[in-house]
Every structure is written in C-alpha cells, then in structure tokens.
Amino acid sequence: MKKYFLGFIVMTGFLSCTTVKAYQKNRINDSEMTLSNRHVEKNELNAESYREGSSGANSGKTGGGCGCN
Amino acid sequence: MKKLSLSVIGMYLAMVQAFSQTNAADSSGYKPKKLKLDEINFVTSYYDQTADKSAVMGGEPGPRGIADVTDFATGLDVTLIGWDKNKRKNTLAIGLGIDYHTAASQAYVDSNGTSKNNGTRIYPTLTWTRENEQKGTSFALGAYYSAEHDYYHSFGLNASVSKKNKSNGEFSLKMVGFFDKINMIYPAEFYPVDSVKNTQSSDSIVYKTSASGQTQAFIYTNGQLVGNTKSHKQQTPTSPRTTLTASLSFTQIINQRMQGSVELDAVYQTGYLGLPFHRVFYNTGKDTIESLPSQRLKLPIGFRLNYFLGDNIILRSYYRFYADSWGLVSNTFNLEVPVKITPFTSISPFYRLYIQSAARYFAPYQQHTEQEQYFTSNYALASFTSTLLGAGLRLAPPKGILMSGLKVLELRYSHYMQTTDLNANIISLNLTFR
C-alpha cells in the first residue's frame, strides 16, 4: 500500500508539470518567487545555525568556517 | 521584336543587380565586453539575545550560566559582469563581512568572569562564475577566509556546476571544503599554575589566561598580591577541523504559478569538533572540558515550493529534514507570505517552526558521569523546539528609490524563541544598488 501511495505522489508530481513558455513566466519571474533565501535573511540564517544543532539544505552554512557547529 | 524584348530584359536584369543588396560588412561580429559593475548589496543586522545555561559554564542555570549575546554584522557584496568572445557571461562576486559581538558567557572562560567578552570576525569571499546562456550551463569557483579571536583562521574553497534542461528544470552540484584551525583556549583553571601554598606565608605566581589567550602572571609575596605582569603571549596551540560538503539540487517550474526545488547535502566533518572552552560538570561537581567524537556526518534534505496566489499574494514554503551521526534529528517548517501592496512594495509576514531531538552525547548541567567517553552540555545540541516569527518590508520601484541608484530596500524584523529559555531579536537591512 505504501508503494502505491508513493507512486501516486510521484505520478501526480510529474503530471502536474506543464510546459511554460517564456512569455508565460511573468509570475514565475517575480523577484518574490525566487527559490532561494533573500539577501536580508543572511545573518538571520547564520544565527539559527549557531543556536541550533542542524544546518544545511538551504544554500547556507553546513558547518565549518567559524566557531560554530 | 524578340531581340528588343531580350535586350530590355537584359538591361532590366543589369539594373536590378546594380541596385541589389551586396554583402554588407559583417556588423554582427560579437565583441567581448569587459567586466562592469552590475550590483552592490549591503546587508547589516543587529542581533540581541538573552539566555542562560551557557556552554562555557557547562549548562549551569542562573547568573554564572548567563549567555546573553549581541552581534552587529555587516556585509558588502559587489558583483561585476562581462562577456567573453564566446558569448559566455562571466560574473565576479567580491564580498566582505565584518561581525562584532559581545558574549557574556565568554567572560567566564576565566572562572571569575573576568575574561574578554567581545570579539570581531572578518571574512572576505571571492566567487567567479562562467555561464553559457545558449547551452544553459554554468560553472563557478569560490574562496573564503575567516579570522576571529578564538578561531585562528578558516579557509574555504567551493566549486559548482549547473545544467538547465528543456523542461524548465535545472540540476546543480556544489562541492565545498572548509579547513579551519581552532585556537585551543582552555578555561583558566585548566592552565598550569605555579604551586600555591598557604596564602598566609607563601611566595608564588599564579597564571590566569583570558579568552583571547593572553596570560597574566599574578605575583604573591607572603600571600599578598604585589603585582601582575602580562607575560609574553604564549603560543596558543591550534587544532584542525575539516568540513567537506556535497550539495545536489534540482529546481523545476511546475506551472505558470508554481515552482519548487529539492536540495540534498552530505556533510562530513573531521578533527576537533567541539570548542576547548566549553565546560562540562560531572554529577560529582568536578568540571572538565567537553569531549566530542572527531567525526560527524550530516544529511539534511530541504524542499521549497513557491506559489503565486491570485494577483497579489505569494506563498513561500520550506521544509527540511536533518539527521546526523551524533543522533541529532530535526524538522524545520517555514512559511512566508509576501503580500504585494503595490507592484513594487510588499510586506512579508513569516513563521518558522523548528523541532530538534538531542544528540546522544548531550546531558544538562551535572548530569554526566565520569565513565562516559563523549559528553557535552552545549544546549545547541539539546532537545528543544524553537519558533521564529516576524515580518519584512520590500521596496523595489523600477526607477529606484527617490530616483537614485538604490533599487531595492528590504527591512526585516524577527523574534526567535527556544524552549531552552533563549530569546532573541534580530533586525536586518538590505540595500541593493544597480
């Protein structure tokens, strides 16, 4: 049952991807839609990595480079 | 008549050729363009924290475990772009960061609380990127350096490649290495001292070392302090720490309103992975220095999904699962909702929930036993839940703010709370000039 559910999720993911032409990307190209952290979040993310035991998978610190985790 | 017709046709053709297009001189020849200034980003933040149970005092609650921190961080990034003769875009990003902090716990590197309680960190970065927009590929190399008082130095290198596919997707691979040297500054009571006899009738010299590694000699005659001198700065030993990271990411445009990404990191650390001035108090009351394994493997995976709802609202979501070889597991949920008040002004409230289970080597103050091989009372490795909430303001008029080169202004405030009684506020400002 778990395999079927996982397969359903994967298929749904692929089927939901539609071809988007360049002239249709006005919303996708909005500056607030970027798939990355904002410049203004930089020091906030550093503070989180210092105070918490985990880091990474967010284009930020993963460890090393400072006296932190 | 036929001759006349043929002559007329021949003359016509001759005239047409005389006025026909000739091969014009090639004016489309591409000329490389030198690097020019593209963008300047200036980010500054102020962080203010109140907490106790500091790692320097072995997680001791109360006044001696004070862990209040202030941090003033500023960074400047300058981006230059140019094109070479093969029409590839070259980008050079130069960055400089300066942090100044005060840390109340740092004063207790000396058990009397008299150590230096502030420090400065400077960290320059340099990144070069080459992008082939026709092929949808890019390649980047970068370097990083950091120096602070308790961290002798850190040197980093990174390299990345990316490739776009025809289905609006992009794969990226990034490799990062940090090669650090830690100043082995121990709590003062762990430095060798001259034998102190009965203070009523003894001549002796007692050495005390501050968090900066500076050693002072206190001279006693007949038990009375008669003077102190700063001995020559002892050569503080260092210990290496290496961090290697491989990051694999994939982004995909799903439809006209939605796009997402997944990022998987594999992080391997080796060397001295604790800090030499972090104490641990055994259940007997005796204190020692934390001891952690010399290797650590981290595996975080993060997912982002952004959706443009209606005409004015954007949903920015993020989830991360993290697990490492020290037994620490965490889940992170983040949701930010930018609301466009005008096409160029937005307000973004956000909320972040973080849930962490403790590393297997953590125990609170005076809970460790002397039989354990690895032990720490650093609450960053404890079990806790934290929340972050706040809001941001973004201004980005097309002609710049007040018709100047300032194109983007972002102001952001957040309040951070942990169930370990840590509370913090951070306010940040970003200015982008083009």
Image (cartoon, coloured by chain):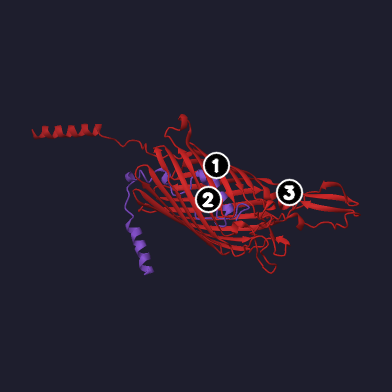
- 1 or 2: tag closer to the N-terminus: 2
**Residue found at the very far top of the displayed protein:** B403
Residue B373's place in the image compared with B410, above or below, is below
Marking on residue B115: 3
The residue mark sitting in front, 2 or 3, is 3
Which residue position holds label 2? Answer: B141
- 2 or 3: tag closer to the N-terminus: 3
Of all chains, the one bearing label 1 is: B
Marking on residue B427: 1
Label tally: 3
Q: Give the amino acid at mark 1.
A: Ile
Q: How would you rate the neighbour count of disc 3 (Cα within 10 Å): few for under 14, some for 14-19, many for 20 or more? A: many
Whether labels 3 and 1 share one chain: yes
- 3 or 1: tag closer to the N-terminus: 3
**Residue found at the very far front of the displayed protein:** B62
Q: How would you rate the neighbour count of disc 1 (Cα within 10 Å): few for under 14, some for 14-19, many for 20 or more? A: many
Q: What secondary structure is marked by label 2?
A: strand
Q: CA distance from mark 1 to mark 2?
A: 31 Å
